[in-house]
Image (cartoon, rainbow, N blue to C red):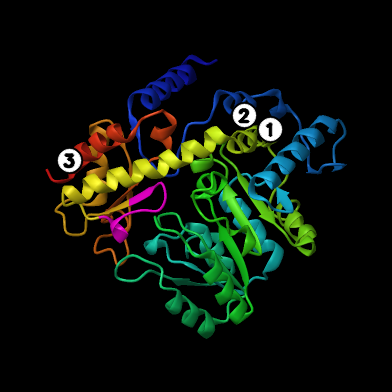
């Protein structure tokens, strides 16, 4: 290995080992997943799908991809799955490609309210190709389904997107299904942040209600960096698979698909379910301490791994607090809040997640002490 690369690698190993990781979209994959992500599967091109490859020599690629698909279907109790998306945003883009035409109207969660760039944000391809509108949250930070329904009735979108990047409470997939049916829209659920908790039985599974579900495979699912798509309607299979290849991607990353297979197997164990219980418990213990120390929390709590702290009435912005925490060995990310009085660069919030440090084995008392330390830094 080049000495310069080895030096950077060692520095990052040291950073991950000796800092506290609270970024809600990050986690620590198992040794088996890490080994597969760096395995000889990376040497093989396998454009196409199992038994329908462009290249020869793909018999073992077919085996590992079929195994990943079957384990994923088992994990979320769905009929069909695609494990080829390189990331969650690619999965969303492929679904748009499959079901929409340029200029079609889509309705997704506003970025400032907790949505994701790929749900129709103007700087993203989803906001440039499609006629994208958004819905937000109420003054307390909660989704207001009546407001969303009324907006959908006015706009008549071709597709409604449910799911969030910074929303800590349970999203009512059934209500989104009812709204979509009322206006004749397709329902796409992006469960990226909640997919591990869903697999562990600690958050509602959207597959019963959504036409299509997308996700990443890292975050709470604790796998390699990548994306997935799952669905139940056989009529969608050709469209969705075509939306990935050849619609938006070329050759699949077979080393990552192998690591995904291992991830799905790990997530379908009693140990993983116990882990998910602890992730939520630890988040709630942190919220208790924040409340005791007069640290405002959006929605005053959490139903997931996610906590969004509101700094709008504090002297320091989200950027400043995130930097101060990093100086103290704690990694979080600045985050916008609904009706944020500060700029997107500064923000008035920080986002905290408990998935990664729960993986390291920390208990509720450790998280309570950590929340006290964070409170002291925020309060100066």
What number is the disc on residue 365? none
Secondary structure found at label 1: helix
The residue range painted magenta reads 297-307
- Nearer to us in this view, 82 or 204: 204
Q: Residue at the spot x=62%, y=29% of the render?
A: 37
Q: How crowded is mark 3: few (under 14 residues within 10 Å), some or many (20 or more)?
A: few
Q: Residue at the spot x=54%, y=64% of the render?
A: 173
Can I make out residue 348 in this image?
yes
Q: If you read the primary sequence from the N terminus, does the residue marked by circle 2 or circle 3 appear first?
A: 2
Residue 39: percent from left, percent from top: 66, 24
The residue pinned by badge 2 equals 37
Secondary structure found at label 3: helix
Q: In this view, does 256 lie above or below 101?
A: above
- Nearer to us in this view, 326 or 191: 191
What number is the disc on residue 258? 1
Looking at the rendering, which quadrant does residue 75 occupy? top right
- Nearer to us in this view, 363 or 260: 363
Give me the C-alpha separation between circle 1 and circle 2: 7 Å
Q: Is residue 271 above or below residue 378?
A: above
Please say if the residues under marks 1 and 2 sit with CB atoms less than 8 Å apart.
yes
Give me the C-alpha separation between circle 1 and circle 3: 42 Å
What number is the disc on residue 377? 3
On the rendered structure, is 326 left or right of 96?
left
Residue 43: percent from left, percent from top: 72, 27
Please say if the residues under marks 2 and 3 sit with CB atoms less than 8 Å apart.
no
Residue 187: percent from left, percent from top: 61, 68
Q: How crowded is mark 1: few (under 14 residues within 10 Å), some or many (20 or more)?
A: many
* On-image quarter of the N terminus: top right
């Amino acid at each position: 290995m080049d000495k310069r690369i080895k030096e950077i690698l060692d520095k990052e190993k040291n950073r991950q080992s000796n800092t506290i990781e609270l970024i809600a979209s990050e986690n620590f994959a198992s040794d088996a997943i890490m080994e597969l992500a760096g395995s000889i599967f990376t040497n093989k091109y396998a454009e196409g799908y199992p038994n329908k490859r462009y290249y020869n020599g793909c018999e073992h690629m077919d085996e590992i991809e079929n195994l990943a698909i079957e384990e994923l279907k088992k994990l979320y109790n769905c009929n069909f799955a695609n494990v080829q998306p390189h990331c969650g945003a690619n999965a969303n883009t492929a679904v748009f490609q499959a079901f929409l035409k340029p200029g079609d109207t889509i309705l997704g969660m506003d970025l400032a309210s907790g949505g994701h760039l790929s749900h129709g944000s103007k700087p993203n391809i989803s906001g440039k190709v499609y006629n994208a509108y958004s819905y937000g949250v109420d003054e307390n930070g909660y989704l207001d389904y009546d407001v969303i329904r009324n907006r959908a009735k006015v706009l008549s979108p071709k597709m409604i997107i449910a799911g969030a990047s910074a929303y800590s409470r349970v999203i009512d997939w059934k209500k989104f299904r009812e709204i979509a049916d009322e206006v004749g829209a397709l329902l796409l659920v992006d469960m990226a942040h909640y997919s591990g908790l869903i697999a562990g039985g600690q958050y509602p599974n959207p597959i019963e209600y959504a036409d299509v579900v997308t996700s990443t495979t890292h975050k709470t699912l604790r796998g390699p960096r990548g994306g997935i798509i799952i669905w139940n309607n056989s009529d969608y299979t050709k469209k969705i698979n075509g939306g990935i290849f050849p619609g938006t991607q070329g050759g699949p990353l077979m080393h990552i698909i192998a690591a995904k297979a291992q991830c799905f197997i790990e997530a379908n164990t009693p140990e993983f379910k116990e882990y998910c219980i602890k992730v939520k418990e630890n988040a709630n213990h942190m919220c208790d301490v924040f409340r005791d120390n007069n640290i405002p929390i959006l929605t005053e709590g959490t139903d997931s791994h996610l906590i969004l702290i509101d700094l709008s009435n504090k002297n320091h912005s989200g950027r400043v607090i995130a930097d101060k925490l990093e100086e103290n060995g704690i990694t979080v990310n600045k985050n916008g809040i609904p009706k944020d009085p500060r700029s997107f660069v500064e923000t008035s919030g920080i986002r905290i997640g408990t998935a990664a440090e729960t993986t390291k084995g920390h208990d509720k008392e450790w998280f309570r002490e950590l929340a006290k330390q964070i409170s002291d830094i925020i309060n100066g």
